[in-house]
Image: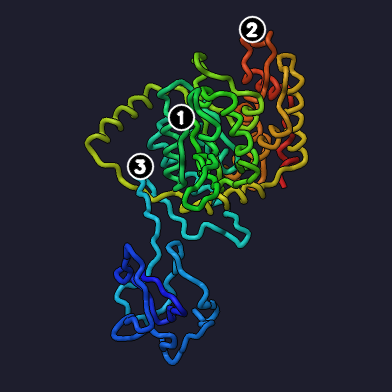
Amino acid sequence: MEFCNDATVLSDATVPSNDDVTIHNEPAQLGDATVVSDGTALTDSTVMSDSTVPNDSAILNDSTVLSTREALNDDTVLSPPTAPHSESKTAYTPSNPATKNTHIAATNAPFTNTDPLSSDTGQLSPAQFHQIYESLISAIGRTIIGKTSVIRLCFIALIAGGHVLIEDTPGTGKTTLARTLAALLHLPTCRVQCTPDLLPSDITGITIFDQHTGSFRFRKGPVFTNLLLVDEINRASPKTQSALLEVMEEHQVTADGTTYAVPKPFLVVATQNPIEQSGTYALPEAQMDRFMLRTSMGYPSHDAAITILSNTHAAKHTQSEEIPLPLDSAATILAMQATAQHTHAASSLLDYIVRLVESARHQPEVESGPSMRAALALLSCAKVLARIHQRDYVLPQDVKQLAINVLAHRLVLSMQAQFNQVKQEDVVQRVLNAIPMPQTDAVTP
């Protein structure tokens, strides 16, 4: 790249191309009569373009002033000016990120959505919301066989702005579910394999010294993504587990007094093996409370297992067909989140949710019950479920259907209850049976 002294000016009519840029090991000096191009000599008062004579305060691009005392060094980057009438053969075009092709088993009906937003408020119509949901469930169902309920819970957590904890034995498809969900949503995803020697900075990031600039800069960790898969989270030390508390609740990371926001939407899908206890650390109550939903994959049924084996054998001989992605960008997910937030919830329904949470706290087997965060999570999930059923209002059945997945993992049972092998799900089910649901007429708008 050539260097200019005195008052060298790049005119509006000069557009550098990729072929015009030359890198020299030593900077080429331009003297008072150095030839620039086509016999044009550059002097102290050389005319550069159409009767424009640069002086000590030559004007660049009608607004930028470059004085003779300013120098261009190796770190200076000159952006090529826009010149539609340039004579350069190679036009300047910014590099676009490569589009990643996702190959997943094809669905029967392709997704079509020309206008994801139904109004200027950034919300979706009920038909559009349901269409995206059905396309996503159908596409993931081609890979995750027979687990529609688990897929639905992951979708609800994503739209409700929460996180999912999947407890199950190895080999049940937890990682495959998270990867398939990220691929179909067209979202960046990162995976953290938790081990006892994993450090908090390995997840959030670390401040390093940059020798080129002579200053410290923050190198972001894998948490700065849209979908974060934390595999075997209970194998990380309690110190490392606590690194996720802030980012899961506030969607930000604080390092050395500086706060960095994670991209939106943000979903954490964590997995753990509840059976194996060797080399594991139980998640603390504060960490469990950060997860909006807890679910279990479970072993596939007999017919589903045969289908999985058949599809795996066929995949070795046939090439998977690419399907249209159900969602074009994160903006559509944010629009779905805004749509779910504007779902009507009657006062009688809110009273029903509060009575469920309060009753769960006062059960004899419960040492520590669900907090107010649990009530908020239950309401948010119920709103998404109502939108899935193409309703703009929440019914008590929506709350009752999600109560176990939202409340059970937040209960801390007493030692006597654990000795008697009381399950958290049984406690929540007893609460649901004891608290009557409000009438449907009282919750409809």
Residue 286: image quadrant is top right
Looking at the image, is mark 3 or mark 1 earlier in the sequence? 3
Q: Is residue 227 left or right of residue 445?
A: left
Few, some or many residues within 10 Å of mark 3 (<14, 14–19, 20+): many
Compute the Cα span from label 2 to label 1: 32 Å
Few, some or many residues within 10 Å of mark 2 (<14, 14–19, 20+): few
Please give the label number shown on residue 419.
2
Disc 1 marks which residue?
193
Identify residue type, mark 3.
Answer: Ile
Compute the Cα span from label 2 to label 3: 46 Å
Few, some or many residues within 10 Å of mark 1 (<14, 14–19, 20+): few
Residue 123 position in % (x across, y down): 60, 55
Disc 3 marks which residue?
104
Identify residue type, mark 1.
Answer: Gln
Name the secondary structure under disc 1.
Answer: strand
Residue 69 position in % (x across, y down): 52, 75
